[in-house]
Structure formats: structure tokens, C-alpha cells
Image: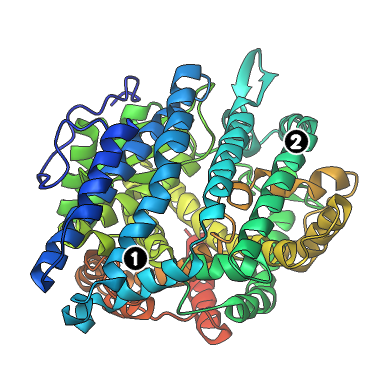
Amino acid sequence: MAAVKTLDFKNLPRDFPRRFVPPGADLGRWDQVESLFRQLEDRPLSSGDGLRKWLQDMGEFYDCLHEEGSLRYIRMTCHTDDPDIERAYLDYLEKVSEPSKPRFFSLSKKYWNNPFRPSLPEKEFFLYNRSVENELALYREENIPLETELEKLSQQYQKLSGSLTVSYDGKEQTLQQMARYQESTDRQKREETWRLVSQRRLMEKNGFEDTFGKMLQIRVKTAENAGFDNYRDYSFRRKERFDYGPKDCEAFHESAEKAIRPLVVKIQERRAQKMGLEALKPWDLSVDPDGLPPLKPFGSIEELAGGCERILSKIDPEFGRNFRQMEELGLLDLDSRKGKAPGGYQTELNDARVPFIFANAVGMDHDLRTLLHEGGHAMHSFASRTIAFSAYRQAPMEFCEVASMGMELMADPYLGEFYADPKETARSVSRHLEDVITLLPWIATIDAFQHWIYTHPGHSRRERSDYWVELRKRFGGIEDWSGLEEIRASLWHRQLHIFEYPFYYIEYAIAQLGALQVWRNFRKDKAEGVRLYKQGLSVGGSRTLPQIFETAGIQFDFSLGMIEPLMEDVGRELGNLQAI
């Protein structure tokens, strides 16, 4: 399976034929988009059934527009160095996405004020009505151009990040490609490459800071326009966090410090002891502590895709069939190359109701994990695609990440598809579980950092940097940063969520706790565990967040009381893996 090059997506399935938007409509042209808006705006709604049909048509229209934007975003992230693709994406933001926002808002008002709305079943439309009411309360027309400007700044951040390369080992390499050297058993090489990458990022320090400074000002203004004291509170409402709030996040921060960080310290102390080091440096955290060479699960993108397909099939045959369909339809772009945006993601093509996976695989165990993770998101997309009401197909992000993280954990027993030696499988699983543990305090750091940033909008760059360092001391491990203080103070520049998706990160912690419960169910009874997992995926966003968790056989709870026993389970499993 080769990486996607043309990105024309001509063979997307159309299992759900359009009933309102013409099949040949060019949704990159405003005149055609506006014509569809006018049809919805002008249609008389004289009955409950008519209102239902109108909602279905509006949902279809939104899905089609969203897919047009997603396709252009995919092409842009796959080829950030192509000016024509970049222009097409920016044109869509300016000429279609921005002018569409007030028109969709007017449609929401038309729905809300319709006299037949109360006749719709309350139980069925409760979540949708709650969302629309929230949208109407937050909407400010003056924020639309500000949001477009933020999207442009996000694109600049991606372009800057995606352009960074270094020359090493006789060739130009992306920073993602350089990550493989951090698993080298040659400590000098690890330090050399770590410093090379870190210094390359530092060269762009002012660019990152300038971009974020502009974003911060715009976000503060956006919150003020909507009548909020700060952007944090505005963002929580915007993300429809009806089931938890800032104080719950702060409680998680405390739990991460008290219940999780001590386990991270134990893991790192064991690592330092095995490596015979008095002090762990940042370049000592990814190498195998027993001095074994880096895991190399695959040598080509074809091997990566094929192995993941077989693993998914073993978890559940339906998962394997879904993944195979993605391969056949060209819905995977997995290799790392110059000009490609960093990171990995899964996005929805809403009209076709199929997922697309983007990655930067270079042959590492981490790449395997990334594809399994995004594969979990993709299976979620497939599971909820038959939900008729468009607004209910997408689950809250707190559960979307349960789908992806849970899939990673359920895949562990089948890693023999990539590793013939059980000891190598144990290494991969052990490292994954350690990553689960160490990620949670990192999430607490990122989340607490953003809480401070947006409740202290007048801070200076130096104050922001100092607070970041304080948080790393609170939540970090025992690694030694002496002589590396400037690099440590700028580590947050690599976290794209801070730039592009403010406050979208605590979801990973909440979801990881849910995923560990999925893992516990799966280990206890595979068939029942998978059944409950799929049951949770199938409801999409048609229930409240606690109800979705309950449907999946897990609890929506990220308190200390929940975290401690889960950490004990992981700790025991790590002990078992050490004995293999």
C-alpha cells in the first residue's frame, strides 16, 4: 500500500445518497453554496415532519461542506510545500467557510424559533437542543473573521513546523525522521541528534512565540466579544463541556501529581539503574534501558498497513474489513517526507461517512502505535456512520479518544504480527504501558499551562516561560535538565494542541482512564470486552458523556479513587512483562 500521492478521492463510497445537495455541486464555489443556503432559509416549515426533513437536509448540507474543507485540509497537510494546494485551502477558509458561519447561525435560529420545534420528541432532541441553545448564546458575528484569522495562523504554525529539517548522517531529514535516533544504544549519537533537533527548534523560537502571541490576543478578544471574563471559560462552553468543568480538571492535576508522578519516578529510577547512570538526561528516555537495539516492527509502509490490518482482524473481523476498505479507497497517507505536516491524525469525510488517516511513519514502534490509535478512531467512524441524525454521529472527544486508546491496548496480545520474538513483544507492550503512565502527567502539564495562560492574559513571554518550567518541576520526572534550561523552557512549542486546539488535551487523560477500563474488561473476557467497546462506539454522540461511557461498560470518572487502582493494575502488568 503506497502513500497517497494524487489525493483525488474519486472512488469514495456513496452508501448514503444525497437527497438535498446535488451530486455535482462544487462546494468550493460560494455562489453554489449560497444557493443551497437560500433554499434552506426560504423553505416554509409548517409541520413537525417538515421540520424533521429540513433538519436532515441541513445536516446533509453541513456534512458536504465539511467534507470539502476536510479534503482541502488533507491535501494541504500532505503537501505543505505546494503553493497551489495551500491557496486552495486558504481560499476555502476565506470564501466559503467564513461566510458560511453566519448563515448556519441563521439556520439554527430558524430551527430554534420554529413553533413546531416543541412538538419534536424531547428525549430524542434533548442533546441537539442543548447544543443549539449553547450555540445561539455564544455566537457573535464579530468573532467570525477572528476565527478565520486563527485558522490561518494555525496553518502558518503547521507550515513552519513541517518545514524544519536538519542535515545528519549525510542527508536532509525531517524532525520526525530524526526521532528514530533517540532509540539508538549509542548514547553519544542520542545526545548529538537530540541537541541538533532541539537547537533547530530553538532557531525558530521567535517565530513560534510570535505566532502564539497573535493567537492569544485573538482568543482573548473572542472571549470578550462573547461576554466572558477569560478565554478558558469561553472555551469550556464552546466545547460543550456540560459534564465537567475547570475544577474537575484541577482535581485531575492534583491526582496526576500525587498518584501518577510517583509511578513515573519509579519507572525512571529503574531505567537509570539498568543503564548505570547517576543522572538521566532527556536523550536517555526513549532508548531501551537494557541496551537492546531499537524495535523495528516494519521495513515498509506496506508491511505496516498489512500487519495492522491483521491485528485489527484478530481483535474483531469487522475491524479488519473496515481497514482493508480504507486501503482500497486510498484513505491512508502514512509515510514521512519533506513538506508534509508533522504528527498524525484521523479525520472524517462526512458526506461519504468514511475516515482518512494521516501519519509520518519512519519504521519505529511508535509508528505502529500511531496507526493502531488512529485506526481506533477510524473504527469509531465506521461504527457510527449509520446514525441517521447527522448531529449525533460524532461523539464527544473525551470518548473519541477512548476508541483510539482502547484499540491500542487491545492490540497488545497480537503484536506477534510484527515481532516474532516474545521478548520483543513484551518490550513493545511494556514501553507502551510506561508511555501511558508518563503521558498523564504531561497532559496535566499542558492543561494546567493553558489554564494559567488564559486566566493571566496580560503575562509576558518570560512569565509564561517561567510558569511552564514550574509546571515541569511539579509534574515531570527525574530527568536532569542542567545546561539545557533554554530548551526546557521552550518545550511547549512542539505541542500543536496549544497552538491549534486550545484546551483540547485534557480529553486524552479522561479517555486514557476510560481506555484502561476497556483494557481491563478485554483482559477479563475478550468477547464481552470487544462487545461493550463496539457498543460504545455505535452510539456516536446520541447520549450524554457519562451515558456513553456506561454503554461501553466503563465509568466516567477521573478522580483519585479511579486512578489509583488503574495504576496498580498497570504496575502489576509491568512487573509481569519484566519477568519475560
What color scheme is it?
A: rainbow
Which residue is label 1 attached to?
109
Instruction: Tell me the crowding category of disc 2: few under 14, some 14 to 19, or many 20 or more residues within 10 angstroms, Cα based.
Output: some
Q: As displayed, is residue 339 above or below residue 407? A: above
Q: Residue furthest top?
A: 170
- Horizontal side of 206 relative to 326 (left or right) equals right
Residue drawn 58% across the image and 80% down it: 248
Question: Which residue is the site of mark 2?
Answer: 198
What is the secondary structure assignment of the residue under circle 1? helix
Residue 385: x and y in percent read: 19, 55
Q: Which type of secondary structure does the marked residue at label 2 adopt?
A: helix
Q: Earlier in the sequence, mark 1 or mark 2?
A: 1
449 vs 473, nearest the viewer: 449
Question: Residue at coordinates 43% horizontally, 66% vertically from top-left?
Answer: 135
Q: Residue at coordinates 25% horizontally, 29% vertically from top-left?
A: 9
- The amino acid type, in three-letter code, at marker 1 is Lys
Amino acid type indicated by mark 2: Ser
Q: Residue furthest right?
A: 483
Residue 45, labelled with which disc? Answer: none
Image side of residue 333 versus residue 83, left or right? left
**Residue 309, image quadrant:** top left
Q: x and y percent of residue 167 in the render? A: 69, 18
